[in-house]
Image: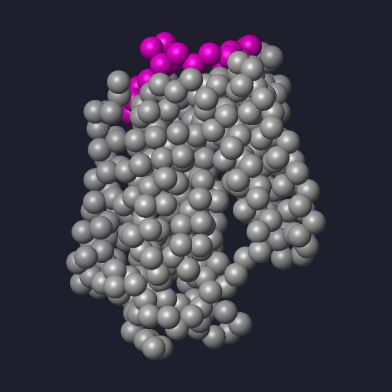
């Protein structure tokens, strides 16, 4: 029953690279959030917070275009949002990378599974789900 | 309340949530959502958006270590992510239409359940019962390092585990939490995967599941930078410290203590939900 072939050596390399990828993602996103936090607090520390009611019609929508334009003007909130986006995309990138890994191993079933999961997430990104 | 004070309170709370999470296995959202809604009177929809960020941060942080050690079963994770990502998106789309009071009650029930799961004895199933046919087809069986040698395990009841993962993803998208307790039920109790593998693999999956719902929340404006910033920074630094302490701390009493804390938070959430308090 002890099938040594279960986890082939290729899996091991993929796992090592996956680990490094996740670490880089975390460190870079948190650094960006931290810089954004300093800018945001510097300009707004005395403002009053108002989070009592979330109104989807009023709330500023997160859009990549707006974040990028906010970045050019050094807007703290946009910098934080950029960091948050990097954080969200870290696991997404991980899937993309796993797909390549399974491709190298010629494990096409798992390439397919990975592509499916990625498609589901990108479907969420396409903004078709907003009602 | 001023931005500075708010940031400070949330940062401290998130740090504690991250620390406790690393020591006991409780997810960050379990503490962050009650902190934001009960104490700081933040709308639960904002709290959900901030909480999912803590889930992604801790999952990716912890997964980076576990994946390297070779405990995580990437195939099981990837396969089950089919269920969790689809249902997480469904949950994240639906959550905005659910009355905050109902969300609070559901959240409270999940908290009670997580507290009980935390106290449950863990068992390391490794048996020679023949694996599920689906498990063979999907090559889910694996091995993990224990005491300097490889331990092999078989995976059972793949279909049942897959269905349970669908529920876990739905709850995750609805409430903005990792629903680790439900994921462990699917893998540990139904699929009979050894506990060490099921916890790390569930953690590994949470980042992807969380990203699926986070994208929906992000579009909707539910992830406010002013709340997400202290949550992300606090939780991550807390969990890094927690992971260091874990080697030296006896966690049994800590778990009992936090089970009581979580049960108290659960009762508050349910009470406020039932009395229109949120």
Identify which residue is drawn at 74% across, 41% down: B261
Judge whether A8 appears above or below B140 on screen.
Answer: below
Q: Position of residue B83 (x, y in %)?
A: 34, 50
Quarter where residue A94 is shown? bottom left
Judge whether B28 appears above or below B97 on screen.
Answer: below
Q: Nearer the viewer, residue B6 or B80?
A: B80
Q: Is residue A55 magenta?
A: yes
Q: Is residue A23 magenta?
A: no
Q: Position of residue B112 (x, y in %)?
A: 64, 42
Magenta segment main secondary structure: loop
Identify which residue is drawn at 68% across, 15% down: B2
Quarter where residue B107 is shown? top right
**Which residues are the magenta region?**
A47-66
Judge whether B85 appears above or below B139 on screen.
Answer: above
Identify which residue is drawn at 48% across, 68% down: B192
Q: In the rendered image, which quarter contains the N terminus of chain B?
A: top right
* Model colouring: one colour
Q: Position of residue B251 (x, y in %)?
A: 75, 59
Q: Nearer the viewer, residue A96 or B89?
A: B89
Q: In the rendered image, which quarter contains the C terminus of chain B?
A: top right
Q: Is residue B22 visible?
A: no
């Amino acid at each position: 029953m002890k099938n040594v072939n279960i986890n082939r050596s290729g899996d091991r390399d993929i796992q090592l690279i996956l680990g490094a990828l996740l670490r880089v993602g975390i460190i870079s996103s948190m650094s960006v959030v931290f810089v954004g936090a300093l800018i945001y607090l510097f300009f707004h520390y005395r403002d009053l917070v108002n989070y009592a009611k979330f109104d989807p019609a009023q709330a500023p929508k997160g859009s990549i275009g707006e974040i990028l334009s906010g970045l050019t003007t050094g807007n703290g909130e946009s910098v934080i949002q950029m960091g948050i986006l990097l954080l969200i995309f870290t696991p997404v990138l991980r899937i993309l990378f796993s797909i390549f890994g399974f491709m190298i191993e010629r494990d096409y079933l798992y390439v397919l599974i990975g592509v499916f999961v990625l498609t589901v997430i990108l479907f969420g990104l396409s903004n078709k789900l907003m009602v | 309340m001023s931005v500075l004070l708010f940031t400070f309170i949330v940062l401290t709370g998130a740090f504690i949530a991250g620390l406790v999470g690393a020591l006991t296995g409780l997810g960050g959202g379990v503490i962050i959502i009650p902190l934001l809604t009960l104490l700081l009177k933040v709308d639960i929809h904002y709290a959900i958006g901030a909480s999912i960020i803590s889930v992604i941060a801790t999952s990716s942080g912890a997964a980076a270590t576990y994946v390297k050690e070779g405990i995580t079963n990437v195939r099981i994770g990837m396969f089950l992510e089919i269920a969790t990502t689809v249902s997480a998106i469904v949950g994240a789309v639906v959550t905005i239409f659910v009355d905050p009071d109902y969300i609070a009650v559901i959240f409270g029930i999940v908290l009670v359940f997580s507290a009980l799961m935390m106290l449950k004895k863990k068992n390391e199933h490794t048996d020679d019962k023949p694996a599920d046919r689906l498990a063979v087809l999907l090559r889910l069986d694996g091995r993990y390092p224990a005491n300097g040698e490889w331990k092999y395990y078989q995976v059972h009841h793949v279909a049942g585990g897959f269905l349970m993962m669908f529920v876990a993803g739905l709850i995750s998208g609805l409430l903005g939490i990792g629903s680790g307790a439900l994921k462990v039920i699917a893998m540990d109790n139904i699929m009979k995967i050894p506990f060490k593998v099921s916890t790390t693999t569930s953690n590994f999956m949470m980042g992807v599941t969380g990203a699926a719902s986070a994208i929906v929340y992000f579009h909707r404006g539910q992830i406010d930078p002013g709340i997400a910033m202290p949550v992300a920074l606090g939780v991550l630094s807390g969990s890094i410290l927690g992971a260091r302490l874990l080697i030296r701390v006896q966690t049994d009493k800590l778990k009992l203590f936090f089970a009581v804390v979580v049960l108290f938070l659960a009762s508050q959430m349910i009470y406020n939900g039932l009395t229109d308090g949120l």
